[in-house]
Image (cartoon, rainbow, N blue to C red):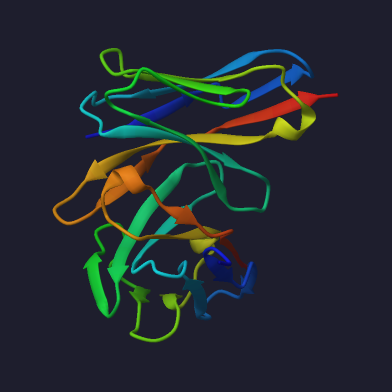
Amino acid sequence: KQEVTQIPAALSVPEGENLVLNCSFTDSAIYNLQWFRQDPGKGLTSLLLIQSSQREQTSGRLNASLDKSSGRSTLYIAASQPGDSATYLCAVPLLMDSNYQLIWGAGTKLIIKP
Amino acid sequence: NAGVMQNPRHLVRRRGQEARLRCSPMKGHSHVYWYRQLPEEGLKFMVYLQKENIIDESGMPKERFSAEFPKEGPSILRIQQVVRGDSAAYFCASAARTTPNYGYTFGSGTRLTVV
């Protein structure tokens, strides 16, 4: 049974720092892994999708890495800004017969202090 | 393209009432998924629907919960006789295809509060 864990549950850092968010999964046979951002009271925004054959994906100041063998992914945020404050979620797909569903971590709540 | 539209954004119901949550998928998307996010927890899959068909409802409670996606109109998630434990954020997502490579597009969610 696939389980996804995110540590820490909350993180507060000063503006300008680089930081790393962690995501681990118990079944390494994943199809891909996706990072999302959730702002308070709002929906989910997809940040990066990293395929199982890839080691990393980059978008602007964000870099996601994937190590299937160890069951881990990291989201690296460079030069953090107050606008990066949000909850960051990771998810992996669980393939079913005719569709798939996402298995989610509980998220890391990130606060960037000005 | 307005994206995935969910309404209402916030819904307050007294215990025992019915809650109806609506989701209009993105234009051209025929696959709809509902997820529930309990406070301080990750999202959990509830149900997957295509037009006029429930494909997978393995994540939906057997009682009081139902979902539909009619030929015309939005998908509806219905919760009858709500209880305090139903208080959560309910997210709808739509997709053009069911392979993981294409991902979902999520709506902004409906936050249900049962008082």
The quarter of the picture where the N terminus of chain B appears is bottom right
Q: Please tell me whether residue B42 is drawn above or below residue B28 in the rendered image.
A: above
Tell me where residue B25 sits by quadrant: bottom left
Total labels drawn? 0
The quarter of the picture where the C terminus of chain B appears is bottom right
Residue B94 spot, x, y in % from top left: 41, 61
Residue ranking furthest to the left: A97
Does B80 sit left or right of B57 as displayed?
Answer: right
Residue B60 spot, x, y in % from top left: 32, 62
Residue A76 spot, x, y in % from top left: 56, 18
Q: Residue at x 26, y 49 (%)?
A: B99
Residue A105 visible in the picture: no
Does B115 sit left or right of A35 as displayed?
Answer: right
Residue A100 visible in the picture: yes
Residue ranking furthest to the right: A114
Residue A37 spot, x, y in % from top left: 58, 39
Q: Residue at x 55, y 60 (%)?
A: B87
Nearer to the camera, A4 or B55: B55
Q: Residue at x 49, y 55 (%)?
A: B106
Residue ranking furthest to the bottom: B72
Q: Please tell me whether residue B65 is drawn above or below residue B98 in the rendered image.
A: below
Nearer to the camera, A110 or B58: A110
Does B109 sit left or right of B25 as displayed?
Answer: right
Nearer to the camera, A51 or B83: A51
Q: Please tell me whether residue A55 is drawn above or below residue B114 in the rendered image.
A: above
Q: Residue at x 28, y 67 (%)?
A: B62
Nearer to the camera, A51 or B14: A51
Q: Please tell me whether residue A90 is drawn above or below residue A76 in the rendered image.
A: below
